[in-house]
Amino acid sequence: MRTPAIALVVLLTLACTASASASVAITSFKVTPSTTQAGAHPDLTIDTAFAPDPSSDDVKSVGVVLPQGLVGDPNAADRCAAPAFAADTCPASTKVGTTTSSVTATILLVDVPQQVTGDVYDLQPKAGEAARLGVVLRPSLPGAEKVFLQSAVSVGPDTGYGLKTLFDGLPRTAAGFPIRVDSMQLVLAAKAVHGPFMTNPTGCGEAKSTATVTSYDAPGEQSASSSFAPTGCDKEPFSPSVSGSVGGTGQTKRGVSPTLTTVVSTGPGDANPSRVKVVLPASIAANLATVSRQCQADLFAAGNCPPEARVGTGTATSPLLPRPLSGPVIFTAAADSGAPELAVQLGPPVPLTLIGQVLLAPGALTNTFDGIPDLPLSRFELTLDGGGGRNTGQLTNLADLCRADTPLGLKGELLAHSGRTADVTAQLEPSGCESIIVSAGPGRPRGKLTLRFRHRRGTLSARFSSAGALRRVRLTLPKSFRKPSRHGLRVKGGKRRLHGRTLDIRTSRRAVSLRWTGLKPGRSLTRRLKRHPRLVFVARVTDAGGRTSKLRLGVRPSVR
């Protein structure tokens, strides 16, 4: 996921040099980073040598699978268009590596050694590809044409989530003469024009690469492997965070099914998470009425889950991909124990299925994703659908989400591939509580108020109406706000005056509305904003007959 580009390059070089009258056998294969520091950005050197046996047939294809976590960032360079690559006019800003091959050309029964050099470029990927690399080889042999090789990069469970490239149909001659590849070297750059290109795994276990070759005439394939061990995992940063929201319009009352969104984020340079455990607040529990929607393990394995087993959506963002991976969340069961699980099926262009084990502990509904590959996922968002009804979603509210005393604390326990751990907490944002509608009774005035905070500045929207004409509306802000300013205040349907924290509107219409931006919280409220405290606004609405109704509008603001 993190380097479609890197694997491509590796394969490219292997492919280029391997094309000749050389033996299929690989006599040596070595992958060497310039630094073994975990998570660092090395120059990566890939050396491959072939058995010098002119009597054997020629190499047809070369494939390379890099270790999980050893990635390259295709966004670190510009992308070369196909016509420019075919004309060998790729801009320097698309270059991500170099290659050198030692070959032997047989000319009139005389072996002539040659050094063939070339460059590796970041190409524009085709539809459905995460990245594509191209190699241009420029032989010095008189009459020999340039060699152009390119390959897509794939990554998935079949490669252990290591990057895989395959170069097929390698040339067997140059300038009409048979050639034999003796050895090749590929160097992938640590940095490209826009920043770091190569990145080491963030874990310190064995990092194993595999090269595979096939020939034109002989069946089967030959393979070789190379390993190194990243070091210094204790030096890698790991500062993840969690956030989320719960509820929605009509989904905040006790006993109904809310929409729940949880987000796990990591920072630039952080080690990649290996395990993520999220503990929901006691105010949210599993909705046992939906157990019939569960897809059994055998049906899930066969890809035959019924539509009702889909209970949400997952989205994973990687800095190496142009757009997030997304896919359905399936309510399934563990094959061995039958315990409930949530399967998140992400892709394309990277097929990635994450399995979350659900623990229905009293007062602490828990979901744990373990065995996450060492891939750069900077943000993972999981949304479980609600609906407001009692049997429409996987969760149920055990309390009114809009009450100030309803616990909404979210806990996260994370383990990185580096071995570091992090315990993080956050407050779920009670969605649907930032707005409230209050009526004084049949035929009496009613009010609607919405409050949102962005970057510690509040925006208040309100509307007051009645069946008959109104005379006056007085809206008082809570004392936890600083004294407001007239700037940013817009009133429709009446004339305004501001007295301290009270807005006084005179009108003769049936409705007045207002929008007030730039509201500043006091010190105490500023400290409490992340907990989405309940704030009460008092409105006194006087009708044309002189009767005044008092409306108390309590909201829990959304905060960004």
Image (spheres, helix red, strand yellow):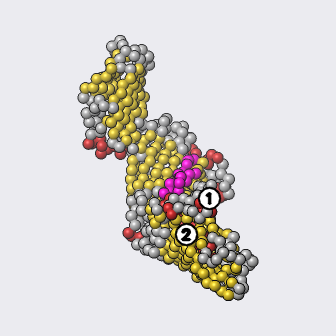
Name the amino acid, label 1.
Pro
Q: Quadrant of the N terminus?
A: bottom right
- For image coordinates 33% across by 13% down, the residue present is 546
Q: Residue 23 at what x, y percent from top left?
A: 67, 82
Question: Does residue 67 appear anywhere in the picture?
Answer: no
- For image coordinates 44% across by 40% down, the residue present is 431
Instruction: From this view, report whether residue 76 is shown above or below residue 108.
Output: above
Figure quadrant of residue 526? top left
Instruction: From this view, report whether residue 5 is shown above or below residue 138.
Output: above
Image mark for residue 119: 2
Give whichever of 539, 191 is nearer the camera: 191
Q: Residue 148 at what x, y percent from top left?
A: 63, 68
Figure quadrant of residue 161? bottom right
Magenta region: 311-327
Q: Earlier in the sequence, mark 1 or mark 2?
A: 1
Query: Marks 1 and 2, how far apart in space?
Result: 16 Å
Q: Residue 67 at what x, y percent from top left?
A: 54, 70
